[in-house]
Image: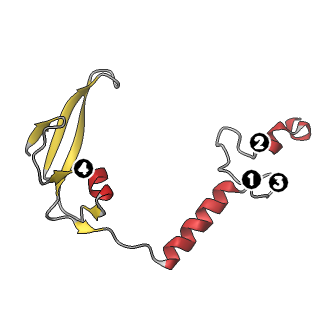
Amino acid sequence: MPTFPFRLAPDGYATRRQLRAAGLRPGGQNIAAQLMWFSCRYGRRVRVAYLYRVDRALPVRPMTPAKWAALALANAARRTCPTCRRDAGYVIPASLGCCVTCAESPSLAA
């Protein structure tokens, strides 16, 4: 597999994020190349980013009404407090497990 240093990949290759920003997806193709570099942030370990060929990438599939509805339900479930069953208006923190109002309530602290 061709390996390139960080930021020195030739034109025609892109990571998944770069493809997504361009409105593309890998489309089932295999990894074409990779970038490798040492990362000081992660204890001088070798990091790897996989590259895909841009000319073989396919357009991103559009969201259907059913997908939009499922996403709306999932986001609503993340905002609903399991204690008081109200929509908090924000995503419930996993550290609290309930909305801030319920977490600060003295009756629930016992």
The residue carrying mark 4 is 15
| Crowd band around label 2 with a 10 angstrom C-alpha radius: few (<14), some (14–19), many (20+) | few
Mark 3 vs mark 4, foreground winner is 4
Mark 3 to mark 2: distance in Å? 11 Å
Give percent across and percent down for residue 78. Answer: 64, 55
Mark 4 to mark 2: distance in Å? 39 Å
Q: Residue at x 51, y 78 (%)?
A: 65
**Which is nearer the N-term, disc 1 or disc 2?**
1
| Image quarter of residue 103 | top right
Which circle marks residue 88 in the picture?
Answer: 1
Mark 4 to mark 1: distance in Å? 37 Å
Which element type, helix, strand or loop, lies under badge 2? helix
Is 102 on the left or on the right of 54, as rendered? Answer: right
| Crowd band around label 4 with a 10 angstrom C-alpha radius: few (<14), some (14–19), many (20+) | many
Mark 3 to mark 1: distance in Å? 10 Å
Circles 4, 2 touching at the beta carbon (< 8 Å): no
Mark 3 vs mark 1, foreground winner is 1
The extreme right residue here reads 107
Residue type at tag 2: Val
Mark 3 vs mark 2, foreground winner is 2
Circles 1, 2 touching at the beta carbon (< 8 Å): yes
Mark 3 to mark 4: distance in Å? 43 Å
Give percent across and percent down for residue 76. Answer: 65, 62
The residue carrying mark 2 is 100
Residue type at tag 3: Cys
| Image quarter of residue 37 | top left
Mark 1 to mark 2: distance in Å? 9 Å
Residue type at tag 1: Ala
